Image (cartoon, grey):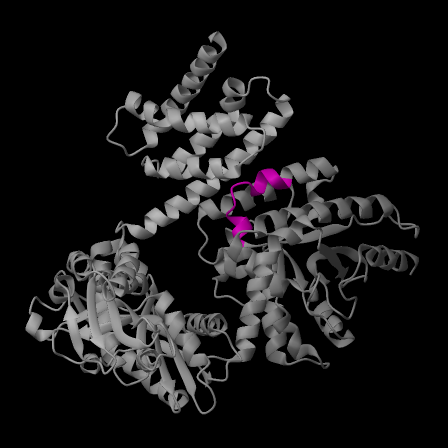
Amino acid sequence: MAEEDGYRDRLRRFATIWSRAVFPVTSTPLTRPEFEERLLPLARRLSEALRARVFDAEEGRAVGAALVDAHCTDPEALSRTLDCVDAYLVLYCGGDVAPQEDLRARSARLQHAMAAGYARALRERTLSEQEAIAQAALQAQGVVAQALHASEARFRAVFEGAAIGIGIADLEGNILQVNGALVRMFGGSEQGVRGRRVMDWAHPEDAPQVWRLYEELVRGERDHYHVEKPFYRPDGTVLWTNLTVSLLRDADGNPQYQLALMEDTTERRLLNLRLRYEATHDALTGLPNRTLFFERLEKALNAGEGQAFGLCYLDLDGFKTINDSLGHAAGDRLLVEVADRLQACATAPGEMVARLGGDEFVALTTGPRARSEVDELAARIMNALGTPVRIDGRELTVRGSIGIVEGPASGERSAAEVLRSADITMYRAKSAGGNRFEVADPEADARAITRHGLTTALPTALENGEFFIEYQPLVHLGDGSVRGAEALVRWLHPQHGVLGPDRFIPLAEHTGLIVPLGRWVLEQSVRQAKEWRERNGGNGAGRAADPLRINVNLSPCQLTHPGLVQDTVEILERAGVAPDALCLEVTESALIGADDDLLKPLRRLAEMGVDIALDDFGTGYSNLANLRRLPVSVLKLDRSFTQGMQQFPADPVDLKIVEGIVSLAHSLKLTVTVEGVETGAQAEQLRLLGCDTAQGWYYARPGPPERLHELTLVDATG
């Protein structure tokens, strides 16, 4: 007796733990103690199944189904039940009827059986309830089919009480019965629905397969189909539905009726259309945005044989100035006005206008004649922009640059490639002064793409050691001795090979990389100058060798950099080289109109002993009198002065000009270097005119530093 009492106590404790775990996730009107009493018989069944001599999985399935009957329909209820059974069933109800390992294995099998029974019962319960529209549709179909053969009263209750529209028609399409929900969908007039034929509800926006599926169903070839279908209401408005049509058969399986279940999706569709519109149109101007434009462009590019496209890429000139001066609100009103004008320019079939963002717009024309019509479209746009826009009492002149791309719709180019070409062409029009349009040129595109690739590769090129320096000797015209060399940086590009400074120095200037690159060139050149001076302490010819000097070009960006003087001093001191070993070359154009602040770092370097050379002299428009205030010690005549000296004697006018410059320079105690010397005749004329040093291919092409050492040895040995 005591043993039986102990067993009941353990069983009660198990039921208590189980109820406490499951009750919070159970939808039941019972209290927790009442719910525990509901679980106690189920706990006993699990205990007996665990201890039975022969295992019966049906007991576990029955307990799982009983949980659903007890309103434990939340999946969390099953999860918590299985956790309790796994943790406590063997502990409280196992006893010593079998080894613990066997009991735990049997407990695991009971859990699997409970889960299976629970899932089956929950599925049956779900199918039998009207908890959602989809379940209601399935229930209505099943109940209606059964009601036509059994209980008219039960059918009528479901038919009228369903939340979705239900209609029944015969196989000829005559509508026999409709419920209240369907009547309400069509405006509340039963006369407007009952008595009509199914075919009367055809709509211009019906999907192509709708009526084919309908014919197959009434012929008995299919049992149901599901489509999205619009209907006209009596007042002319459109009702959008999710429509499921099923075939109802008689007791012998012969087709007898068709059953339609309708879910009103009009509001949902309108919401989706609104969201789609907002996702594909610009909020400010209402024009199609980049997303929709790319869709249309992709379609146009793949239109097939005989079709073509034309694209205008527009960027407003000076729009940032308007934003900065008048504010963003005024800028937005200007963009709206521009959008309206563009929209008025593209009204023909196959034309569209979109805003890509900021002040960038695109206009697309498609069709067989698009390639010839795109120029006309661009002209219309430029003409439309010509009229000033009045904003806040001010008349604003609108200018724009347009890049045009046209071609066949062969699918050979992607939308991204076409847009990139148009963008490049637009910037070409802007660089030419703006307020114009240019047509895409594949060669110009390739050059622009190459420039972009070089620009992005510049930073890593310096890190990867892809730059190197070649040196071109500076030769004294009096005795032919080598006095130094000009450092010329080169880029050994992994794909393009060796690139001269004209290919990448402007890009480095634009990106600001010229400062670290210039510092690297200066470090390498000064280090090379030290090596030359150490190797050429004497020339072996009975006279002291003149110290070799290194000339390094200084870009305008470096000239304005605040660290120029400090960097130069540190590099010279670190290399142990005197300042007179260095000559910094600055172009004449960089110093035109230079104020004292710009000249101050050059003056400080000159005071230290660094020579300053005015490079490309004669190509600018500077006043010769300005030479007095510039801290320069060397004039480098541009190579254009040597072009007229190919023959001997040279053009007298050229000679007079050079003679005057040399005389002026010497009177100011400046030395004169001439670039571009290619023949002996040029060298002789320049020597007679009094020029001091020269460089050019006549003496040597730029090369490695070892070549300069070889030239100095030749000079020394005569």
Specify whether residue 126 is painted magenta.
no
Q: Quadrant of residue 569?
A: top right
Q: Which residues are magenta?
A: 556-568
Task: Examine the rendered structure and indicate whether residue 71 appears above or below residue 559.
Answer: above
Q: Is residue 433 visible?
A: no
Task: Name the residue: 33% across, 27% down.
Answer: 38
Residue 570 versus residue 517 in the image, above or below: above
Q: Residue at x 25, y 69 (%)?
A: 260
Viewer-nearest residue: 282 or 431 = 282
Residue 657 rendering spot, x and y as whole percentages: 58, 72
Please indicate, yes or no, whether residue 708 appears anywhere in the rendered image: yes
Q: Nearer the viewer, residue 248 or 455?
A: 248
Image quarter (top left, top right, bottom left or bottom right) of the C terminus: bottom right
Residue 329 in the image: above or below residue 606: below
Residue 517: x and y in percent read: 62, 50
Extreme residue toward the front, this view: 1
Q: Is residue 158 left or right of residue 190?
A: right
Asked whether, in this view, residue 422 is left or right of residue 462, the answer is left
Q: In the image, 521: left or right of 380?
A: right
